[in-house]
Image (cartoon, rainbow, N blue to C red):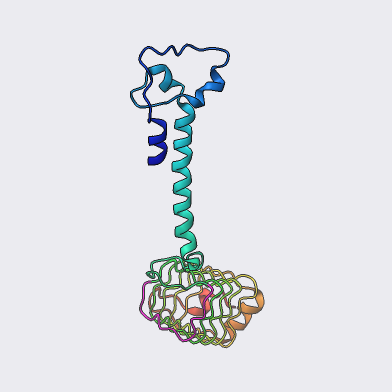
Amino acid sequence: MALLGVSLCASKVPPNSPLLPSKSLPLQISSLPICSDSPPLVRNLASPLALCESVARTGALALLSASLFFADPALAFKGGGPYGAGVTRGQDLTGQDFSGKTLIKQDFKTSILRQANFKGAKLLGASFFDADLTGADLSDADLRGVDFSLANVTKVNLNNANLEGALATGNTSFRGSNITGADFTDVPLRDDQREYLCKVADGVNPTTGNATRETLLCN
């Protein structure tokens, strides 16, 4: 832009130059030397220059944004939520220790979380959509509003976990999981899953005071 400014303002408009409109004026506008101290008529005809400057600024911003995006391809897969810059979506996090952490609305979609430790973690509104949680420890965890849709939750420790309002649609499976003291209030479960869980349900959730069997609407 600096070079453009020099080339356009290299010469001054003679003070006595007639700049009256003519039939050929539209063809001559681009050749006029336009400067900040040019007569008003010239400045009014300088809209092409202003447009060019605007386009140039927009282009520069677009290039800057693109460079920031493509500099780190992993940005597209960074887990949402407050877990720093940790990547938690679509990752192999087998055996990772998240115990006691605040992971509200954290995004663990499609991640492998086998034997991961979430004991006592605050996971309000987090997403485990299509994740593999086989053998994970979710005991004493705050799982209110968590999305377990299509997740593999088999052999998981849900002892005293609070799952109020969690989603468990699709092929979500809790087979082999410890649900003693877990609160399943308002969790939509398939009939076969509810029937299975009612066979092993026991205990009372220490946080809500609700009996596990009652929250599962067991007969």
Q: Looking at the picture, does residue 39 appear above or below residue 74?
A: above
Q: Position of residue 48 (x, y in %)?
A: 49, 29
Q: Position of residue 56 (x, y in %)?
A: 46, 41
Query: Total number of numbered labels?
Result: 0
Q: Looking at the picture, does residue 168 appear above or below residue 204?
A: above
Q: Position of residue 192 (x, y in %)?
A: 66, 78
Q: Main secondary structure of the magenta part?
A: loop
First to last magenta residue range: 90-102
Q: In the rendered image, which quarter is residue 194 located in? A: bottom right
Is residue 1 visible in the rendered image? The answer is no
What residue is shown at x 53% (from left), y 69% (from top)?
Answer: 147
Q: Position of residue 39 (x, y in %)?
A: 37, 18
> Is-magenta flag for residue 100?
yes
Is residue 160 visible in the rendered image? The answer is yes
Q: Is residue 134 left or right of residue 61?
A: right
Q: Is residue 193 left or right of residue 122?
A: right
- In terms of depth relative to the viewer, which is nearer, 44 or 147? 44
- In terms of depth relative to the viewer, which is nearer, 62 or 175? 62
Q: In the rendered image, which quarter is residue 42 located in? A: top left
What residue is shown at x 55% (from left), y 72% (from top)?
Answer: 148
- In terms of depth relative to the viewer, which is nearer, 68 or 97? 68
The C terminus sits in image quarter: bottom right
> Is-magenta flag for residue 40?
no
What residue is shown at x 50% (from left), y 66% (from top)?
Answer: 73
Q: Looking at the picture, does residue 1 appear above or below residue 106?
A: above
The N terminus sits in image quarter: top left
